[in-house]
Image (spheres, coloured by chain):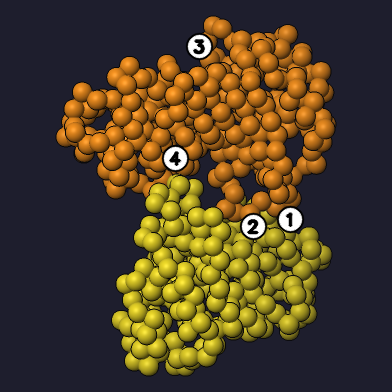
Chain colours: A orange, B yellow
Amino acid sequence: MKRIALVIQYDGADFSGWQVQENAIGVQNVIEEILEKIVGKRIPITGAGRTDKGVHALCQIAHFDTELKIPGDKWKYHFNAKLPDSIRIVRSKEVPRDFHARYDALKKMYQYTVYRDAIRPPQYRNYTAHVSEPLSMDLMEKGVHMLVGTHDFHAFMSTGSPVNNTIRTLDTVEIVEKENLLLFTYEAQSFLYNMVRIMTGTLLEIGMGKRSLASIEQAFSTRKREDAGITMPAQGLTLMKITYEEEL
Amino acid sequence: MKRIALVIQYDGADFSGWQVQENAIGVQNVIEEILEKIVGKRIPITGAGRTDKGVHALCQIAHFDTELKIPGDKWKYHFNAKLPDSIRIVRSKEVPRDFHARYDALKKMYQYTVYRDAIRPPQYRNYTAHVSEPLSMDLMEKGVHMLVGTHDFHAFMSTGSPVNNTIRTLDTVEIVEKENLLLFTYEAQSFLYNMVRIMTGTLLEIGMGKRSLASIEQAFSTRKREDAGITMPAQGLTLMKITYEEEL
């Protein structure tokens, strides 16, 4: 028995997310179906984490066990020959039998992309949120400094999420301007549900002058969802990187 | 009565092309429906030229006549507020009453985009053709020099097209490498049906060593479709620019 790890890219626009939701097909499901065709029987694959409907991945990680003698780096060809264009296996590798895509993940990095000119070209519509209001980079940078570090992010989590401990440590928050795009990058060991989309909504509202910087401290202390900003739409969000002790 | 010109961007993936085809909706149709909502009656719009299903536009031009007193540059806001994200009016302008989007067009520029690494990331799937074979830039450049100029392009037109005169003058053909992309740019007063996609297929087959440079001369003289290369898929093609005597 061998354990194989996959590095997976997908376009969230075509799927219900990583997992099956509300009758729409999940990325995990599609990959399991192809694996069944290759192997001849159903084998579950374990992903590093879920992504929601519309959210993209440049580096989702998953693993599965097999007795087939296909060398680790050849699996990607078998998958890509059968997968739809909207899912690509960019790397495949044999990993130690005790490797676990979810439990061994040390850090995750997400990027949220905003298109901020008056008119958003059509080809950006599935990959960005559109903000046409002027934004103060200075105010948003100050907001970034307040988010970084260890806080109770309860207010930055969608209500009703079944999580007890809402304390998280944000290692990195960064905003980069690239032509008409604003790229918000977040890195942490783990995130709460919708936390990246809510933090981005909060920073943008601060940048627009609709919200004070002090509201971030207030949201940390009241822990109330309504004290943080809006949840930005899914299509601007991309899972960029998952860090393990050894690079995959 | 005023004549208004529109500069239009659209994502071809969502439409049957500029015009209605086989029960799928055309871009022109969508814009006419919005115009009807703004004006209160159906007014035809005239486009500079058709694009096929899957083909994109960064600068399609159309015009229409109206008695409404909306200033020329404000029309784009009225349209964009109601159009789907996959169509944007990037400019609107009042033009002289005798301006004609199709008849006044002096030149058109198309770009064909190829993704040429082994694995194509999912977000490129609707905007590029995928070529994983090695390509000789040197051979393709030689092919470019043979295409430029005035020739009988009958072999580079889809069979059955109702055109008498198949002589065209290509002003510019250019191939630019940009990271993993190859950008083929073509400029001419007018093109035959599928000519850009067939020229690109021919150049790529030459670059792969599947076709000789001499075959271009042969295709010019035999005028036979089978002597030119394959028709590349629609999604790699974008209408980039239409030139008029005065800039719109």
Q: Nearer the viewer, residue A41 or A148?
A: A148
Q: Nearer the viewer, mark 3 or mark 4?
A: 4
Say which residue label 3 marks: A162
- Answer few, some or many: residues within 10 Å of disc 2's Cα (few below 14, many 20 plus, some between 14 and 19): many
Label at residue A47: none
Callout 4 and callout 2 share a chain: no
Say which residue label 4 marks: A10
Q: Secondary structure at mark 2?
A: strand
Asked whether residue B202 appears in the rendered view, the answer is yes
Q: What subunit carries mark 3?
A: A
Say which residue label 2 marks: B88
Taking the spot 73% from the left edge, 8% from the top edge, the residue there is: A221
- Answer few, some or many: residues within 10 Å of disc 3's Cα (few below 14, many 20 plus, some between 14 and 19): few
Q: What subunit carries mark 1?
A: B
Amino acid type of the residue tagged 1 in the rendering: Tyr
- Residue contact at pointers 2 and 1, CB within 8 angstroms: no
Q: Find the distance from the CA under tag 3 to the CA under tag 4.
A: 27 Å
Q: Nearer the viewer, residue B160 or A11?
A: A11
Label at residue B77: 1
> Please, is residue A189 above or below residue B7 in the view?
above
Picture coordinates of residue A75, whole percent (x, y):
28, 38
Q: Secondary structure at mark 4?
A: strand
